């Protein structure tokens, strides 16, 4: 197989992995979400601390976050860009998270996502995930949770 | 040259590029900072909007940001992790930005940085940069600019 063909096939497999990850997230299926992560994952997440080290710390995070939504979580991926080279891939996108919290509050926020994948034993797994919103530089230091692409 | 040797040498060259980039940033040398970026760069930055497309938009950003500091900018890189595969590299680190603003205000903030490099015509250039702080989930939605690694 030529490098070009292999890269195309790898990109298709990563796109499929991202689709399946998003489906699992929407369904709040922790086991299925976690199946996409490498054990030595490092996450830069929306909430403090600066970094979560290891897949277990992400799992605890999701176990706390999922029940804050009534029913399923809305998750839409936009402007997805995938860059693959051999066994490493870099993906970036703008993701919209929507839903109703158990408090009754509506959530509708666009976040930036940068995700790296490693092909490990033939399977593309997430090794690093950076999710954020910017913040306003007007002295309020408020997270910019009201932006749209 | 074996793949392992080439990867080691590539990692050393990327580390050198990051060192030079940081030196240029500290000196507020826009031309030298910009020499590290690919023209089709996409940046997810600390300030809105969600994304900056193209190196020119980053340049405008830096041209506005650099003069807000009295003298040089402090920039320290910690926990740098570099993952290289062929012509693609993924770097993550925790960076400390310090200095005195022209307003007299002191800045001392740790940010998360995820940066991807592409080897283009033999030179490692930044194609994507994601810099952020998390925000507090206590209802204040304040950017967490007071965290330490």
Image (cartoon, coloured by chain):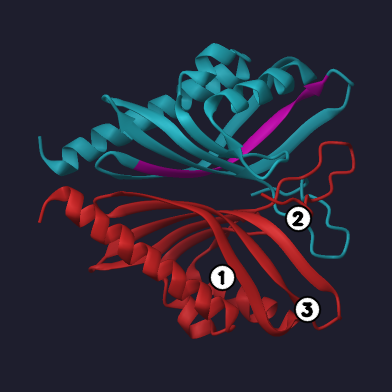
Chain colours: A red, B cyan
Residue annotated with mark 1? A58
Mark 1 vs mark 2, CA separation in Å: 17 Å
Q: Is residue B63 above or below residue B11?
A: above
Secondary structure beneath dot 1 equals: helix
Please tell me which residue is depicted at 73% across the width and 61% down the height of the picture.
A109
Label 1 in the same subunit as label 2: no
Label 2 in the same subunit as label 3: no
What's the chain of the residue with tag 2?
B
Say whether residue B30 is visible: yes
Q: Is residue B94 magenta?
A: yes
Give whichever of A43, A53 is nearer the camera: A43
Q: Which mark is residue A100?
A: 3
Q: x%, y% of residue B119?
A: 31, 32
What's the chain of the residue with tag 3?
A
Please tell me which residue is depicted at 44% across the width and 32% down the height of the picture.
B126
User: What is the magenta range?
Assistant: B89-101
* Quadrant (top left/top right/bottom left/bottom right) for the N terminus of chain B: top left
Say whether residue A49 is visible: no
């Amino acid at each position: 197989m030529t490098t070009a063909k292999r890269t195309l096939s790898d990109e298709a497999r990563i796109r499929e992995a991202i689709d399946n990850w998003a489906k699992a997230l929407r369904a709040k299926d922790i086991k299925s979400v976690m199946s996409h992560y490498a054990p030595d994952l490092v996450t830069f997440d929306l909430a403090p601390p600066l970094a979560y080290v290891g897949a277990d710390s992400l799992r605890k995070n999701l176990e706390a976050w999922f029940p804050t939504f009534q029913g399923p979580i809305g998750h839409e991926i936009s402007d997805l860009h995938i860059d693959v080279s051999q066994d490493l891939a870099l993906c970036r996108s703008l993701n919209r998270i929507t839903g109703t919290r158990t408090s009754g509050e509506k959530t509708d926020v666009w976040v930036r996502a940068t995700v790296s994948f490693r092909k490990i034993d033939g399977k593309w797994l997430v090794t690093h995930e950076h999710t954020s919103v910017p913040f306003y530089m007007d002295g309020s230091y408020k997270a910019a949770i009201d932006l749209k692409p």
